[in-house]
Image (cartoon, helix red, strand yellow):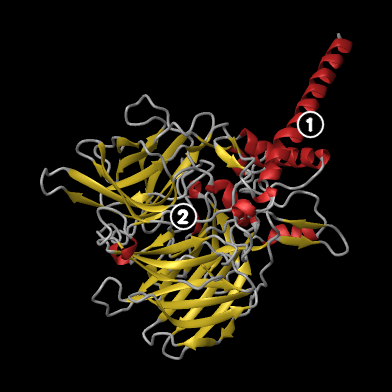
């Protein structure tokens, strides 16, 4: 009996090892090849504030406030006389927080920065053999089968068998660095003597938040949405929450992917003490179509509704590949035949009923990383209730594999057709509905306005307002109102004659209707210069929507600048050299000198 039991267990164990080895040799190595990116450079940490010099132009005298920006900064770790470790995906570099205190009255800019995930660096440099993170967004380590197996066991231990509550983790022991929000409400457990302090929180697409000291930028605490309400314990949420500047409520969701996808859409009161579930979505409004475990990075908010986009870019395998590879991207699939659905949810529940009132399909499917403004209007001719939703939309999910090398500058060289085989898509195949190997990103998606007829439960109109736009921002005083101007980034891939360039644009959405025309776009462009998401800051006495400035970071020739543009003309008002490095930042927020939110993400 014991003999047969031992034999059976040995055979089972052997089969598992063979299956895992097969997986490692095929799937793991396939994803490794897709995501092999160029090497990223590291940022220096500037813990003690330094004064920066205004290199040209002048900061407007009325300007007084703080810009925070967050993004990856440390990619290469090195043990003393030991092995090195390079992170090979733009999203996975150890996040840095940057703080700029800008004062126009005396033309000063003070800057400091800090690594937010210091524990990873310390752990690696301390000869810890474990991977620095249980799950990366896209990075896959180049490791042997045995090392991969050890990492897999460690992932299962940390994520499934013995997960540690976020609030018990060391403050700097997780990668939380996609968005930064000053004034974010804290859960009750984090209230106390600190109630009146300036609160700064960094966020990501996983259900984890990081409280950071608003001046020193030192990580102070990790927590998650379950700290507000135990029911919000899903694995994911949106890095971009929504915020009502009038009611000061915060909106987000908790997404669980197993055993069945479940999305809990909720709101949190301004003091962080009260939560309300607006909808629990396992099926669409028709109660038949299952909700897909979609990747949702941002969503829309209007005065009466939360609108969640469910793109056909989803976790189709219940996260199995993510667990096996350690990369979130390996679980992502694009379903070419499935529409993008817009789930419309009431902000003000009626009699405790679930707030989901429509799941409207948009047949020409799209994926949006970044939504723009949204608002409600009544159709003057029919009286129908209309929702206007703006977003930077990609026509498919390829961006997920393309963005692995985002931020690495590319100088002029032969175009794609003449490029080396490793760069071409001539051998391109589909893997999970996504092109691979990924063709280098040469432009962004379109900036699109979707108009939904809520009365008829249908799409009314779709307009492309501008081509090639990402990171849309606008005057936040127009949040949930019909805005005229949208600002964003525009990408031009390298050619034989031109360096890759990422410029800033201003779109006049009123002159672009009903169809796209380039006449409605003002541009700030310098060949070879890579600008990041612009943040609009209104002049305090402004009477017009675009009376103010744009703040952005700009990289060129291994040098990083803070630039301030006149938002009316898109001309450069001031340029400040930050340092001799390339800072990749995706997002930022701005507060005035009293720490009041002006434009936050
Ligand atoms: Fe984002």
Q: Position of residue 238 (x, y in %)?
A: 47, 49
Q: Residue at x 12, y 44 (%)?
A: 383
Q: CA distance from mark 1 to mark 2?
A: 44 Å
Q: Look at the image and tell me in which quarter the C terminus lies.
A: bottom left
Any mark on residue 268, and which?
A: none
In the picture, the quarter occupied by the N terminus is top right
Measured along the vertical axis of the image, is residue 486 above or below residue 380? below
Location of mark 2 (residue): 187
Residue 456 image point, x, y percent: 20, 36
Residue 282 picture quarter: top left
Where disc 1 sits, the SS reads helix
Q: Nearer the viewer, mark 1 or mark 2?
A: 1
Q: Residue furthest left?
A: 381
For the question of whether residue 174 can be seen, the reply is no
Q: Relative to 520, is 11 on the left or the right?
A: right
The label on residue 21 is 1
- Which of the 4 image quarters holds residue 171? bottom right
Residue farthest to the bottom, as pictured: 106
Question: Along the horizontal axis of the image, is 377 left or right of 255?
Answer: left
């Amino acid at each position: 009996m014991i003999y047969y039991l031992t034999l059976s267990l040995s055979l089972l164990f052997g089969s598992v090892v063979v299956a895992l080895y097969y997986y490692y040799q095929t799937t793991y190595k396939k994803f490794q090849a897709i995501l092999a990116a160029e090497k990223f450079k590291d940022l220096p940490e500037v813990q003690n504030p330094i004064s920066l010099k205004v290199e040209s132009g002048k900061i407007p005298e009325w300007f007084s406030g703080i810009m925070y920006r967050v993004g990856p900064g440390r990619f290469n770790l090195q043990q003393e006389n030991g092995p090195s470790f390079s992170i090979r995906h733009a999203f996975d570099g150890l996040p840095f927080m940057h703080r700029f205190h800008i004062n126009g009255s005396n033309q000063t800019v003070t800057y400091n920065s800090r690594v937010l995930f210091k524990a990873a660096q310390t752990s690696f440099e301390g000869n810890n053999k474990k991977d620095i993170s249980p799950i990366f967004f896209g990075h896959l380590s180049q490791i042997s089968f045995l090392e991969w197996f050890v990492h897999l066991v460690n992932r299962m231990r940390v994520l499934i068998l013995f997960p540690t509550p976020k609030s018990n983790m060391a403050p700097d022991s997780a990668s939380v660095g996609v968005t930064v929000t000053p004034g974010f409400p804290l859960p009750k457990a984090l209230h106390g003597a600190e109630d009146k302090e300036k609160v700064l929180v960094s966020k990501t697409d996983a259900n984890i938040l990081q409280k950071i000291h608003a001046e020193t930028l030192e990580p102070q605490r990790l927590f998650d949405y379950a700290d507000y309400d135990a029911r919000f314990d899903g694995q994911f949420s949106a890095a971009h929450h929504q915020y009502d500047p009038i009611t000061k409520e915060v909106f987000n969701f908790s997404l669980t992917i197993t055993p069945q996808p479940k999305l809990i859409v909720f709101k949190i009161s301004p003091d962080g003490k009260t939560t309300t579930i607006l909808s629990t979505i396992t099926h669409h409004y028709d109660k038949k179509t299952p909700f897909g475990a979609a990747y949702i990075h941002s969503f829309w908010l209007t005065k009466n509704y939360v609108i969640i986009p469910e793109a056909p870019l989803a976790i189709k395998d219940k996260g199995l590949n993510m667990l096996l590879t350690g990369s979130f991207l390996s679980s992502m699939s694009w379903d070419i035949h499935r529409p993008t659905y817009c789930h419309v949810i009431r902000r003000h529940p009626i009699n405790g009923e679930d707030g989901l009132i429509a799941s409207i399909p948009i047949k020409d499917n799209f994926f949006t990383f970044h939504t723009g403004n949204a608002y409600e209007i009544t159709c003057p001719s029919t009286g129908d209730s209309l929702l206007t939703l703006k977003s930077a939309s990609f026509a498919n999910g390829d961006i997920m594999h393309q963005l692995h090398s985002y931020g690495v500058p590319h100088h002029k060289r032969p175009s794609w057709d003449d490029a080396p085989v490793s760069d071409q898509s001539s051998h391109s195949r589909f893997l999970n509905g996504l092109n691979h190997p990924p063709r280098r990103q040469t432009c962004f998606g379109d900036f699109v306005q979707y108009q939904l007829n809520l009365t008829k439960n249908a799409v009314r109109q779709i307009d492309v307002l501008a081509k090639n736009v990402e990171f849309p921002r606008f005057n936040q005083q127009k949040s949930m109102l019909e805005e005229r101007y949208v600002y964003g980034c525009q990408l031009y891939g390298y050619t034989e004659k031109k360096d890759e360039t990422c410029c800033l644009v201003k779109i006049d959405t009123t002159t672009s209707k009903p169809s796209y025309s380039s006449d409605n776009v003002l541009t700030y462009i310098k060949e070879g210069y890579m600008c990041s998401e612009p943040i609009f800051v209104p002049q305090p006495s402004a009477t017009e929507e675009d009376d103010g400035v744009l703040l952005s970071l700009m990289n060129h020739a291994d040098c990083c600048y803070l630039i301030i543009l006149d938002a009316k003309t898109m001309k450069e008002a001031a340029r400040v050299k930050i340092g001799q490095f390339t800072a990749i930042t995706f997002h930022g927020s701005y507060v005035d000198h009293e720490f009041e939110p002006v434009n936050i993400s």
